[in-house]
Amino acid sequence: MIKFWKKELSNISEKAEIGEDTIIHSGVHIHDEVKIGQRCQIQAQVFIPNGVIIEDDVFVGPQVCFTNDRKLVLREEFKPIPTLIKKGVKIGANSTIFCGITLGEDSIIGAGSVITKDVPANEMWFGNPARFIKKVKYDL
């Protein structure tokens, strides 16, 4: 079951695919061609346009903005540039994720970061533009 905090305060397309046990806070915009996996948390005021795929167990902090067009030009036949957020990624508040990139499994994006290129699995990135900070090791 998807859990909405205030669905009436969000703009979530009925065509978007959202997995079980995902929590979506208020003020979130999710467009038609978006896929969100299971057990994700999408915090308040997040913008997710067409072409974004978010796998399972991802945390997206408040006011994160994903983009889907590098040229920012209005075209008659717009095709979004796909963005892939792999399993277990954590994205800090106020980050901007450029289109056409992949955030590797279990990577961490620091608050306020601007991601302009792929982030490998198990790495922490911060800054504007974001840069590699350190490897992340998960002990189970």
Image (spheres, rainbow, N blue to C red):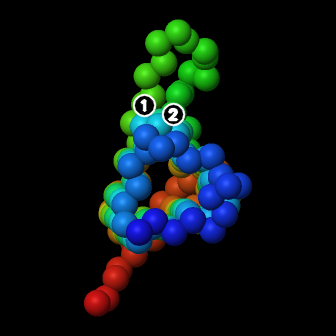
Question: In the picture, residue 126 is in which quadrant?
Answer: bottom right
Q: Is residue 115 above or below residue 77?
A: below
Q: Residue sitting at 53 percent across and 56 percent down?
A: 131
**Pointer 2 with pointer 1, Cβ within 8 A:** yes
The image shows residue 68 at horizontal and vertical percentages of: 51, 34
The image shows residue 87 at horizontal and vertical percentages of: 33, 64
The image shows residue 78 at horizontal and vertical percentages of: 48, 18
Q: Is residue 81 above or below residue 8?
A: above
Q: Residue under circle 1? A: 81
Q: Nearer the viewer, residue 6 or 113?
A: 6
Dot 2, how many residues are within 10 Å of its Cα: few (below 14), some (14-19), or many (20+)? many
Q: Residue sitting at 56 percent across and 47 percent down?
A: 12
Q: Looking at the image, tell me whether mark 2 or mark 1 is earlier in sequence order.
A: 2
Real-space Cα distance between discs 2 and 1? Answer: 5 Å
The image shows residue 124 at horizontal and vertical percentages of: 47, 67
Give amino acid for label 1: Ile
